[in-house]
Structures are given as C-alpha cells and as structure tokens.
Image (cartoon, rainbow, N blue to C red):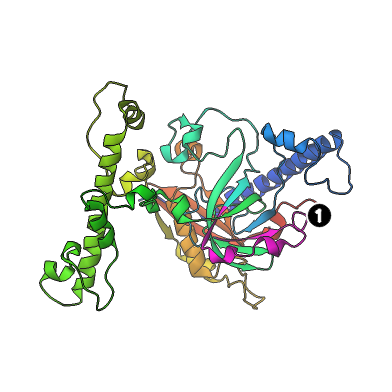
Amino acid sequence: MHPKPQTASVSNEEGDQEHQHADSAVRAHRKQMASLQSVLADGWSPGPRPSRDPGGARASLERGHVQTVPVGYISSCFANKSGTPRQPGICTSSRASLQLRASVFNNPEHALAGLDQYSHVWLIFLFHKNGHVSYKAKVKPPRLNGQRVGVYSTRSPHRPNALGLTLARLEGIAGDTLHLSGVDLIAGTPVLDIKPYIPEYDSPLTRLNVEPRFQQMDSSGTLDAFNTIEEEPGEGEHVSSSQISAKELSGSASGSEVTGASELSKMLAEVKDYLQQGELFAERRPADRAVITGSEPGQDVPSRVSYGPEAYGRIAAWIRDPPVGSLGVRFTPAAEQELAEFGPPESTDTGRPRFQFLRGPEDAAAAIRALLAADPRSVYRRTRCPDRLFFFTLDTADITCWFGDGFAEVLRVRPACVTLDAAVTPAPPQ
C-alpha cells in the first residue's frame, strides 16, 4: 500500500501550481508581444483584405509557399496541455465547439451546408502551444516510454510544419458553430480546415471491391458466386444452392438462420478477399512483389497472403501493445463528493459550480477516468519524479491527483480559478 499524501502537502502543491500558472501567463504574454512586434516589423498595416488571387499568389502556391488563415478557434473543455488527451479516441465524452470566423466567409453558415449529413469530421489545426519551433528527426513518444522513433512515424506536435489532424464526432451544427465530442484539442486551437469523414475513402477496412474488374465474373464464375452470396436474400426470395442458405447449415428454420447466414457471409467475404489477393500477388512482377514485401529483387518471397483487417492496413506493434500499460483510476471519498457538487451547463443554481461543456458529474467522472487511464504524464515526469502530484483542468474543474504503481488516484476536484472563456486565445480582429 502506498501512503496517501497529507493535506498540507496538497495545499503546498496547489500553491506551487498557482505560481506556475502565473509564470506561464507572463511567458505567454511576452511571446504574444514578440510575435506582434515581428508582424509590425514586417510591414503589416490595417486596411482592406487583399484580393483572393493577387499577382504573385498563384506562383507562390505552385512553389509550396502557403499563407494559412484560421477558419475558427476551438472552444474546448481542455484549458491547457496538461491533462489533454493525446488522441481523440481516448476520451469520447470530451466536448468542444468551433465557430467559423466571419472574416473568412461573409456567410459562414453557408460553408457548413450539407455537413450535418456526416457523423464525424476531420479537423486540420495548428499546434500553437508547442512552446518552441525546433524539431528533430527522431522523437520519444510517451507510449514508448523514452524509446526513439522517426518523427513521421508518430503524431508528435514537434514537426517541421506544426500541423495536426484529428477526428471528431459532429454532435450538431447551430448556425456558424459546430458542436463536437471526442476531441483532443485545447481551448484556443486555430483550425485551418474542416473535412467530412467518409469511411469509404478514409478507412482501409471499408475499401472492398474498389476495382471494377473484380466486380466482373471470371471465366470460372467463382467471383460471381461470392458476389451474389454477400447480399442476404429478402423475405420470400429463393435461395440458390450456390448461396448455401443458413437452413442447410443449421438444419432448422428457427431465428438462428439469419445469424448463421450473416456469419457465413462474413466468412465467405474473407475467403473472397483472400483469393483476390492471391490473384493480385500472382500477377505482380517480382520487382513489384519485392517492393511490397520489403525483400530484395531475386530473393524468395513468402507465399503467405493475409486476409481480414490485416489485408487492408497495418500499424506499428507498439501502438497495439505499448510498453506503457493502462492504469486503474480511483477517487477518494472527498473527491467524489466535490465532483458531485458540480451541475450541468443548464443548471440555474447559483450556489454551486457548473460545467460549461460536460453534461454533469457522471460525464466528468468518465472523462477523468479515460484521461488518467492513458497516463497523461510526460516521460520525464513518469521516470524522474513519479511521486509528485499531478494537476490538470477539465472544463471548469481543477483536478489534483497522484500516481502509484499501476493506478492513479484523484484527490481533489475544485472549481477552476480561471474560466475557459479567458483561456481561449483571442482571435484577431475580423
């Protein structure tokens, strides 16, 4: 058992946190002033917006020189980097909104017409809180616990072009504002572009039979049989012997026929994919096969052909099985009681704190558990000072916790001293 930190120690750490917030605010102010002075030194002057295609803009674009303009700034339940999930799938209960700037489109809501037909959107954004603009060819992802890999094999924010890509669930659109969930962006993040997520285009797992020539029946009719069996017959339709009905497999006409047919269809679809890969593999020249398998030209190539999810994409082994495992998360009774005091955003009780994005204490508890289970600490904090208290802000709550051997414990949940509106980086004048 690990001894719990004393109340006095918690108070001292919270005092240190306030000093760190103050120092961070001073540094951020100095950075903004330096950036403003740099812009003024380059000859910026107020005036009408330049034309959409000035004389040298096209040539500059062809050379790859792009001047980006944020289409909006994120309002999020995460006020700073500490405690923000590193990937969007970690905390599905997180909430955010994105309001388009009127300076980009005269009628921003027109640019969103039709986007409500999609469930998810890609957001291309800027890592505006990197702290420095340096970057290296190899980085240390936190999930690798200090091991180095190439920057382009990771999602590291420290890149030659500090651009990020995230997938968010689109909860709804109200006028010129997108309401999102499952985000991993901090308040004030500049968003450069919005694109709909289309599984048929974006997910390798859904790219089945994309080439027309595989839709045609071959000389033996094998592929046609497989194609016809993928679609289950409707009610009252005759099932041919080539389609192998579930009734023939189960020997009964019970409700399990549908399940059996579905499972059979999935199995035959995998067999079909396997055979199609074999055809592709056999048709490729030896040089092409060497490129695909990573072998040298003339070297024997393994005959194994994959099927199922492996056939459409692969990822690094450390993503599925990282050296850093998930943590157990628990709350002290005091922390649970403090969290229960928070009300939902629509609460009218002025005597209790309320969330701005999260729907209530249960939503917040789920978000806290998801964040801490993924161990948001840096490699340095994890290895050099693992016994120190950890602080982060979630929505309008300041969270104090500590980490033990394989677990994290929440000690305090108090109303944040700085609102999220104040944490958002002010947008330039429109």
Q: Report the residue at 43% width, 41% height from top.
A: 143
Vertical position of residue 228 compared to residue 28: above or below: below
Return the residue nearer the eye: 398 or 216.
216
Vertical position of residue 397 compared to residue 318: above or below: below
Vertical position of residue 292 compared to residue 392: above or below: above
| 20 on left or right of 4 | right
Residue carrying label 1: 430
Q: Report the residue at 15% width, 77% height from top.
A: 253
Q: Position of residue 270 (x, y in %)?
A: 26, 52
Q: Which residues are magenta?
A: 95-122
Q: Position of residue 249 (x, y in %)?
A: 12, 66
For the question of whether residue 137 can be seen, the reply is yes
Q: Is residue 255 magenta?
A: no
Where the C terminus falls, by quadrant?
Answer: bottom right
Q: Amino acid at mark 1?
A: Gln
Q: Quadrant of residue 304?
A: top left
Q: Report the residue at 57% width, 48% height from top.
A: 82
| 28 on left or right of 331 | right
Q: Position of residue 311 (x, y in %)?
A: 32, 44
Q: Report the residue at 65% width, 75% height from top.
A: 351
For the question of whether residue 4 can be seen, the reply is no
Report the number of numbered marks.
Answer: 1
Answer few, some or many: residues within 10 Å of disc 1's Cα (few below 14, many 20 plus, some between 14 and 19). few
